């Protein structure tokens, strides 16, 4: 595979904005960026990207295109636009969190057009996207993975070869599933502890010293459930519902009951229905403790 002369980046939202900025700053290549939201696109240009006027424009000007989009439906739509113009793009790297089956089907479809499709979803939070310290799990064959790895290291500190196409999504989806289940458990522990007369902050400090310790406890749980603050400009409940639905679909396809995940989905949906769809998803504690 020839070395790329230009890169593309489509989707400049909560995660994509920082990822695009790091790619532009560290790759040594021009990065042609596009987003349907003008303010997001202008911010990307301010941070070093070149402006594209459309998805098709990116496909005409970039050899490798990175995607960071909300749903697999948008991934399918954007990839269709990219290949329709028969431009330069010959590798598309989807860094969104997407359905495993549809990811694998899309790769087969694009291969018929001479385009290689890679799934490389990211884990960790918005600050990690800004700092370039994401975890990236990559579904690609060995040679293609090695070719892309230097570019992915512009955006993440941990880049994992997950195996074949779709495997990156499997790992990312299961990572999020475990995170949401853990947060559900922390919400229950906080509720029980407070009603038993233990200070919530003290409870979490003590749990962090024992075998219940986790990154979710020390960082996300402590930052949100202890002060009881769930900002909207974070990872909202509606995104957690979307990601957990992907895990449950995968479990159903593989005939795994996933009962704990289903119970957590019930709590998340109740949280969204209570008017907290845009709130940071640990707001599920308000359902667990009976406030909503």
Image (tube, rainbow, N blue to C red):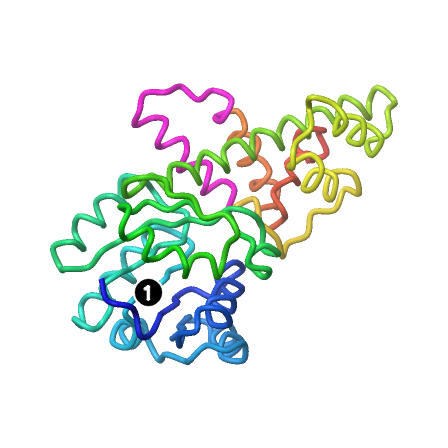
Residue 222 sits in which quadrant? top right
At which x and y percent is residue 224?
72, 43
At which x and y percent is residue 44?
50, 74
Residue 7 sits in which quadrant? bottom left
Which residue carries the number 1 mark?
65
87 versus 171 height, above or below: below
Residue at (69%, 35%) from the top-left corner? 286
**In what quadrant of the picture does the C terminus appear?**
top right
Residue at (79%, 23%) from the top-left corner? 193
Q: Nearer the viewer, residue 195 or 108?
A: 108
* Element under disc 1: strand
142 versus 181 height, above or below: below
Any magenta on residue 50? no
Per the rendered image, the range of residues in magenta is: 239-262
At which x and y percent is residue 157?
53, 52
Q: Is residue 285 left or right of residue 238?
A: right
């Amino acid at each position: 595979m020839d070395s790329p002369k230009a890169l593309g980046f489509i989707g400049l939202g909560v995660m994509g904005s920082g990822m695009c900025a790091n790619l532009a700053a560290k790759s040594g290549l021009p990065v042609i960026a596009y987003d349907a939201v003008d303010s997001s696109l202008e911010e990307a240009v301010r941070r070093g990207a070149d402006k594209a006027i459309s998805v098709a424009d990116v496909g005409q000007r970039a050899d490798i295109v990175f995607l960071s989009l909300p749903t697999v439906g948008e991934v399918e739509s954007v990839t269709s636009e990219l290949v329709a113009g028969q431009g330069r793009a010959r590798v598309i790297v989807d860094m969104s969190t997407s359905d495993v089956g549809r990811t694998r089907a899309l790769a087969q479809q694009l291969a018929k057009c001479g385009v290689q499709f890679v799934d490389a979803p990211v884990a960790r939070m918005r600050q990690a996207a800004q700092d370039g310290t994401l975890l990236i799990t990559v579904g690609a064959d060995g040679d293609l993975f090695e070719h892309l790895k230097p570019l992915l290291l512009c955006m993440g500190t941990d880049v994992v070869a997950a195996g074949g196409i779709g495997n990156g999504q499997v790992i990312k989806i299961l990572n999020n599933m475990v995170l949401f289940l853990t947060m559900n458990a922390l919400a229950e522990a906080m509720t029980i502890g407070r009603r038993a007369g233990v200070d919530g902050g003290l409870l979490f400090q003590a749990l962090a010293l024992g075998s219940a310790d986790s990154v979710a406890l020390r960082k996300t749980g402590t930052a949100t459930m202890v002060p009881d603050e769930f900002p909207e400009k974070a990872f909202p409940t509606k995104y957690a519902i979307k990601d957990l639905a992907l895990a449950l679909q995968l479990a159903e396809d593989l005939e795994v009951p996933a009962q704990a995940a289903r119970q957590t989905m019930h709590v998340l949906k109740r949280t969204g229905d209570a008017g907290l769809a845009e709130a940071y998803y640990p707001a599920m504690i308000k359902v667990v403790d009976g406030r909503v």
